[in-house]
Structures are given as C-alpha cells and as structure tokens.
Image (cartoon, rainbow, N blue to C red):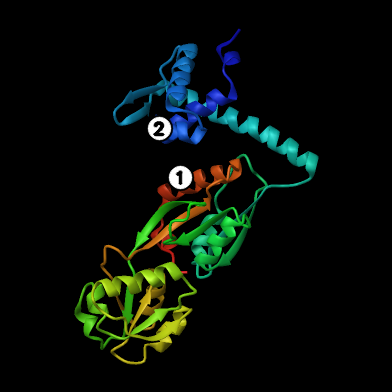
Amino acid sequence: MSVLSHLKIRDLELVVALHEEGSVTQAAKRIGISEPAFSKRIQLIERQLKAQLFERGHDGAKTTNSGFAFIGYAAEIIHTYHRAIHEAQEAMHGEYSKLCIGVSAFMPPELIEFLRSIELPLYRDLAIEIDTAYSAELLTQLRRGHIDLALVTSPPEISAITTLRLVTNSFRIVFREGHPLTAKQSTTLAEVAEYPWVFFNRNIHPYLHDQVLERVAAEHKQAKIAHHFSYADQATALLTDNALVAWMSPPEAQRAACRGLCNLPLLDEHLHLETHLATHADNKSPLVSEYVRRFVKRMEQDRPPEQLSLPIA
C-alpha cells in the first residue's frame, strides 16, 4: 500500500497551511485545531513520507527542498478535490458562487478593479457583486449578513466584526496657495486648529468625525468648522479664501492638487486613515476565507499604493 493511501486531504491541507503561514500557531488557527495536535500530525506525515518537509525554529517553520517538491503537488490535489465537490454541488442545485463585497462610496476605480481581479481556482465561475456605501453603513450590513466582506476605513472595535488592517495613511490638509501653511512640509493638529475648517459630514464616518473633535479638545483647542462637505469636489469649491483648510484623504487631496490647491500630511499619532478588510466574526465560509487569503497575497505581491489608499468614506 502506498504512502499516499495513508494521507488524507486534511493532511495535505495541514502541510500547505504551514507552508503558507510559516508558523504553527497561525497554521493551526487557520485549520481550526490546537497547536499540539497540529504539530503531532505534521510529524506523523513526515514519518509516513520519510522526508522532512519543514525546519522548525524560534522564528517559525521554514519549508525544506523536499517540502517545496511535495507542496506543489499537494496544493494541486487539494484544489482538484474541492473543485470536484464544488462543481458537483453547483450542477445539482443549479447555483453558482457569489461574493458580495462592500466598498466605500468614494472608492477609487482602480481598487474596485483590484477586488474583481482576484482569481480563485476552486471557484472558477465566481460572481463578485460590489455594494457601495459609507463605512458605517457597510459595517451594519456586515453585522446583518447582507454582505460577505467590506473594505472600510478606520472602523471602531465591534465584537461581531473581524478586521485585517491593510494600509495606513495620514489625513491631508488642503488649502489655497496663499495660505500660511504653504511653506511647511507637514502640519500638526494644533496648527490646523488655528484655522477655519471645511470638514467632512458626520454621516460619512461618525467614528472618525468624533475622534478628530475629541483630539482637538485634548489639545485644549476648539475646532472652527466653517463648512461641512460630503464630496471632495464640494470641499474644493468651499475653499474660497486663504484662511480655510479642508480635511481630505490622500486620493482626494491628489485630485485637489490638479486644481492648483496645496496639501500637507497631518502628523498625529492618534489620527490615521486605516484601510481594513472586514467580515463577520462568525463567518465560516470557505469561499470568504479563500478570497481573503488570495487578496492579501496579491496585495503583498503587487502593493500598488495608488490602489490601496482609500478615501474617508
């Protein structure tokens, strides 16, 4: 009887998980078993194969040459096995897989294209539906199960939602060429508080809106809000004199620069625009898990900053 007859698909998945995660802790968490059980099974697999697949150390598990040779075929077997089951079920029910992803109402088109470009070998006929809304609305939709995933900015901690931080950017403070900040390379919250603001509406992002005002109060300052805006084009139109400053995200500020406006990064350790990939904490969908892994892997490979810098909403 061959060695492979003793190995199960689950065993192959354990080996591939350890290779991709590089850590027993993370791989065991991904598979859903304890670390001791995971390690014991990997050792048994290596004994059955009579080959060392991993070198273990304090810095994690590194795949050996034998491991690389084995994993290439193991991954192919896993995909073929799951694809066979998946397509049989689709053929029986006449239904095809769909993933609903929520994105900001002001998402750059390039990022939406990036979302739709993720390919999953197991789900060849996957349909991706994009639902645009403000970040707060997307989190509500996630909690209610109306969408599977969402790209949101600086979400508050919500027990029912799990997020993965992808990118961190600074707010950009936008102003006319004649503004006193023109000669500076960056600015601080205390400096910005000295000028009247063109500030984003609270319904765009309640958490960030309130966080900014709380930080101003902590600096013993008072926000001088002259105008509120919902869209970046409104903000630029409201910069009618050299005293006003507008709060924008990097992509919005870049578009404003094309209109001759200046901008500076706001340097504040408490105020950032963090892009998170979010899903419901209880979501056990293999499709969602596979999509998240592929998305993160592609992002790490490509890392296009112009695509991954999200606006406020």
Task: Name the residue carrying label 1.
Answer: 297
Residue 307, horizontal then vertical, whole percent? 44, 61
Task: Give the answer, above or below, for where 5 lies relative to 284.
Answer: above
The three-letter amino acid code for the residue at tag 1 is Lys
Q: Which residue is mark 2?
A: 25
Question: What quarter of the picture does the N terminus occupy?
Answer: top right
Q: Quick check: 181 above or below 81?
A: below
Q: Quadrant of residue 85?
A: top right
Q: Residue at x 48, y 73 (%)?
A: 204
User: Which residue appears farthest toward the left when viewing the image?
Assistant: 183
Q: Foreground: 250 or 202?
A: 202
Say whether residue 137 is left or right of residue 226: right
SS category of the residue bearing label 1: helix
Direction top: furthest residue? 1
Give the residue displayed 74% in from the left and 41% down from the top: 90
**Residue in the picture at 49% in, 36% down:** 30
Instruction: Please determine whether, in this image, residue 190 is positioned above or below residue 306.
Output: below
